[in-house]
Image: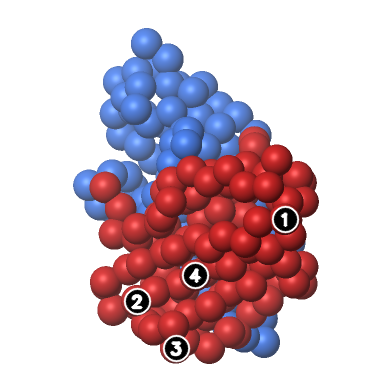
Chain colours: A blue, B red
Amino acid sequence: DAKTTQPPSMDCAEGRAANLPCNHSTISGNEYVYWYRQIHSQGPQYIIHGLKNNETNEMASLIITEDRKSSTLILPHATLRDTAVYYCIVRVASTGGFKTIFGAGTRLFVKA
Amino acid sequence: DTEVTQTPKHLVMGMTNKKSLKCEQHMGHRAMYWYKQKAKKPPELMFVYSYEKLSINESVPSRFSPECPNSSLLNLHLHALQPEDSALYLCASSLTLQGLNQPQHFGDGTRLSIL
């Protein structure tokens, strides 16, 4: 089972910041939080990941709470092309290695 | 554009056919993955290869047969599939399987339809 929970859907106005929350209350000290998104008819696209410090790249920012039990992905100026399903993932340890288990994700609708 | 290439993009096959899906990456990644995704559902892990050896099989039916002939190539052989196997099949790769600080890179998938 996925180790994260996310709201099923969110709306955002074009040009505004989109803030997508994620809860991962069972995360272990050395586990990273990963964010991917999937635009219709495409494969999932890696966005960003982090351990405990806030991270920023050309696509987004990731804010992780101090207790690491939750995080927020921020798209600073959302565009219509950011409409997608966003997945927050903490990988699951198994006998063969670490597995990426997808939860239901958040469907973000960016509206003009 | 994606660095993981999957072919074909679309495949229609009958239940008695044998076909193969192909996945290729040239990023030097040593872990490769197959996922299955039904419409409006998240991807589900099927198989994981690490250094060309099968490391994880998520109890996938034997009509799906994975193969990793070299570090850049991953195949999924299909035989006697059922209509419920119609789905988007996604391939992914990462530097290794054990690394915690390593994102996965996905292809755009093969959309499979079973008649």
Residue at the disc numbered 2 = B72
The reply to whether callout 3 and callout 1 are in contact (CB within 8 Å) is: no
> Of circles 4 and 1, which is in front?
1
Q: Residue at x 48, y 80 (%)?
A: B68
Classify mark 1: helix, strand or loop. loop
Report the chain holding disc 1: B
Rendered image quadrant of residue B92: bottom left
Specify the farthest residue to the left. A58
Residue at the disc numbered 4 = B75
Q: Viewed as shown, does residue A45 lie left or right of A27?
A: left
Label whose residue precedes the other's in the sequence (2 or 1): 1
Q: Residue at x 58, y 43 (%)?
A: B12
Do marks 4 and 1 share a subunit?
yes
Label whose residue precedes the other's in the sequence (3 or 1): 1
Work out how far the residue at label 2 is from the one at label 1, CA to CA, in angstroms: 29 Å
Residue A11: x, y in percent? 51, 22
Classify mark 2: helix, strand or loop. loop
Work out how far the residue at label 3 is from the one at label 1, CA to CA, in angstroms: 32 Å
Residue A45: x, y in percent? 40, 50
Do marks 3 and 4 share a subunit?
yes
Label whose residue precedes the other's in the sequence (4 or 1): 1
Q: Residue at x 41, y 55 (%)?
A: B7
Q: Is residue A48 above or below residue A18?
A: below
- In the rendered structure, find residue B16 and report the number of the disc placed on it: 1
Task: Report crowding for label 4: few under 14, some 14 to 19, many 20 or more residues within 10 A (C-alpha).
Answer: some
Label whose residue precedes the other's in the sequence (3 or 4): 3
Q: Amino acid at mark 2?
A: Ser
Work out how far the residue at label 4 is from the one at label 1, CA to CA, in angstroms: 19 Å
